[in-house]
Amino acid sequence: MAVQIVPMIKQDIPEAVECVQTAFADDPYFHWAFDSSAYNIDRNAASLAAHFQYGLNCNSPIYVAKVPLSDKHPSSIVGVCWWFGPQPPSKPTPWSIWAQDWLLSIRQFLLNVRFGGRGGLNLYRYHLWKTLQRETHDVVWTDPRGYYFCNVLAVSSAMRGMGVGKKLVEVVTRQADRDGIPCYLESSKGFPNLIIYEKMGFELVTEIDCVDGQDACQLYCMVRKPTMKAE
């Protein structure tokens, strides 16, 4: 089956949201960060849509995998990969990104009002994760030019094992190689994800242990060095 890897556009957002929600239904981090008894799938979808719009507005490298519509594939989007581009820590955040941060915060506030809450997101655990993630980046991100950061990678269950995820990742890793910039990702699944990412050139550098009481989630942090130097 022909799979096209193309940049995401605004019209792709609804199907991309559905793809991510389906792919992450069994994700360990998702189950750790959300209260299943209070989970609101519509609130989550609205939040994901707002984040994708944020990424597009920031010109983030976001790609989708598309296949022809069929009975087996009622949705044309079967994979999503969202990256953040490299940002040198020595340089201030561009005002355009700062403005989009505020706009996203406003959208999330309005969604909280509309849905009467955050849809089951455990805010304490979310902030705990963000703090641990920031501390990890301060230690692991040693390249002064910054890193291509794979924020989301999702592939529909029907297309797993067919190389869709690899194609999505390689669009940006090839660009990173041309730029001579390293890549970074975090995975909440050790098996089989670590093996798959290692085949793409990523190496495990550390782990983030998110622990709240008796509940815990482990994130595997991986770095990929560029295979070519920038000219």
Image: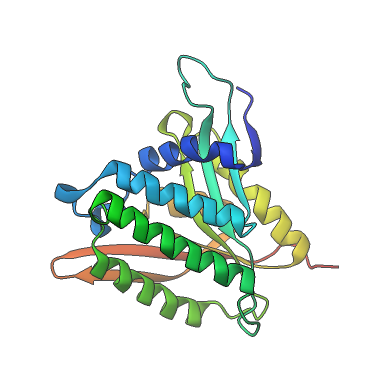
**Which residue: 44% across, 41% down?**
17
Q: Quadrant of residue 217?
A: bottom left
Compared with residue 63, is residue 217 higher up or lower down, i.e. above or below?
below
The answer to which of 224 and 67 lies nearer the viewer is: 67
Answer yes or no: is residue 77 visible.
yes
Compared with residue 120, is residue 229 higher up or lower down, i.e. above or below?
below
Q: Quadrant of the C terminus?
A: bottom right
Residue 139 on image: x %, y %: 49, 82
Residue 169 on image: x %, y %: 60, 49
Residue 230 on image: x %, y %: 80, 67
Compared with residue 66, is residue 91 higher up or lower down, i.e. above or below?
below
Residue 61 on image: x %, y %: 63, 54
Residue sitting at the far bottom: 90
**Which residue: 37% across, 44% down?**
45
Residue sitting at the far right: 231
**Would you say 117 lies left or right of 66 here?**
left
Render colour scheme: rainbow
**Would you say 221 lies left or right of 228 here?**
left
**Which residue: 69% across, 64% down?**
226
Q: Quadrant of residue 29?
A: bottom left
Tell me how many marks there are: 0
Q: Quadrant of residue 175?
A: bottom right
Q: Quadrant of the N terminus?
A: top right
**Which residue: 25% across, 45% down?**
40
Answer yes or no: is residue 187 visible.
no
The answer to which of 21 and 132 lies nearer the viewer is: 21
Compared with residue 35, is residue 209 higher up or lower down, i.e. above or below?
below
